[in-house]
């Protein structure tokens, strides 16, 4: 790889590092493996650096998450085994389910929260990829509908529909396990 120009390096440092946590979270949910997610984010960062040689970015978060999404899809097409299980942890769910007041919790409440978190993690992991990626971009990464549409290359109505279907599927799954 040829060294990046000073302009591309400056654009990269201003754009990518602040988004690495969101990128990792998205990659981890999409590929369902922490180590693979690191590889995907690294590949996405390399792609971003190359792109920043010729591109100035107005909205960095959806731009970079689109690169991460595409890198994940490419990586999974090349490397995915058919029987991979999710390897995430409950920490990934903090953005979806805030824990609330941690100081006043009792053991029963802690156990119930852990069970609910595990149930939600299983329900999210069971979503089909098109619904999962939209849900993660919205509820974990905090992207707007417009930004998700740009990142996923979808019409706005499709994003809204998939998000509604994902949330409905989660609600049904959570209700079924009660």
Image: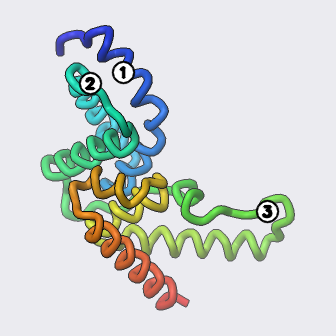
Q: Residue furthest left?
A: 78
Q: How is the image coloured?
A: rainbow
Contact between labelled residues 2 and 1, with CB atoms less than 8 Å apart:
yes
Residue on which disc 2 sits: 52
Front residue of 97 and 111: 97
Vertical arrangement, residue 108 with respect to residue 11, above or below? below
Vertical arrangement, residue 90 with respect to residue 170, above or below? above
How far apart marks 1 and 3 lie (CA) works out to: 39 Å
x and y, in percent, of residue 20 in the image: 44, 36
Vertical arrangement, residue 120 with respect to residue 53, above or below? below
How far apart marks 3 and 2 lie (CA) works out to: 42 Å
Residue at coordinates 63% horizontally, 69% vertically from top-left?
114
Mark before the other along the chain sequence, 1 or 3: 1
Q: Give the SS element for disc 1.
A: helix
x and y, in percent, of residue 125 in the image: 38, 67
Residue at coordinates 69% horizontally, 63% vertically from top-left?
99
Residue at coordinates 41% horizontally, 82% vertically from top-left?
168
Judge left or right: residue 72 versus residue 61: left
Residue on which disc 3 sits: 101
Which quadrant of the structure image shows residue 164? Answer: bottom left
Residue at coordinates 66% horizontally, 71% vertically from top-left?
113
Mark before the other along the chain sequence, 1 or 2: 1
Residue on which disc 1 sits: 11
x and y, in percent, of residue 81 in the image: 19, 57
Which of pointers 3 and 2 indicates the residue nearer the eye? 2
Contact between labelled residues 2 and 3, with CB atoms less than 8 Å apart:
no
How far apart marks 1 and 2 lie (CA) works out to: 7 Å
Which quadrant of the structure image shows residue 24? Answer: top left
Q: Quadrant of the N terminus?
A: top left
């Amino acid at each position: 790889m040829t060294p990046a120009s000073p302009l591309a390096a400056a654009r990269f440092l201003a754009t990518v590092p602040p988004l690495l946590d969101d990128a990792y979270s998205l990659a981890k949910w999409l590929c369902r493996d922490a180590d693979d997610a690191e590889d995907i984010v690294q590949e996405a960062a390399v792609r971003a650096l190359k792109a920043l040689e010729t591109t100035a970015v107005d909205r960095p978060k959806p731009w970079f998450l689109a690169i991460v999404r595409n890198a994940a899809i490419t990586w999974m097409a090349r490397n995915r085994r058919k029987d991979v299980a999710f390897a995430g942890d409950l920490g990934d769910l903090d953005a979806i389910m805030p824990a609330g007041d941690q100081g006043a919790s009792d053991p029963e409440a802690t156990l119930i929260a852990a069970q609910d978190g595990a149930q939600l993690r299983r329900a999210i992991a069971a979503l089909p990829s098109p619904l999962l990626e939209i849900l993660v971009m919205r509820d974990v990464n905090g992207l707007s509908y417009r930004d998700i549409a740009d990142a996923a290359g979808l019409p706005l109505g499709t994003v809204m529909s998939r998000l509604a279907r994902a949330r409905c599927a989660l609600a049904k799954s959570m209700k079924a396990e009660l």
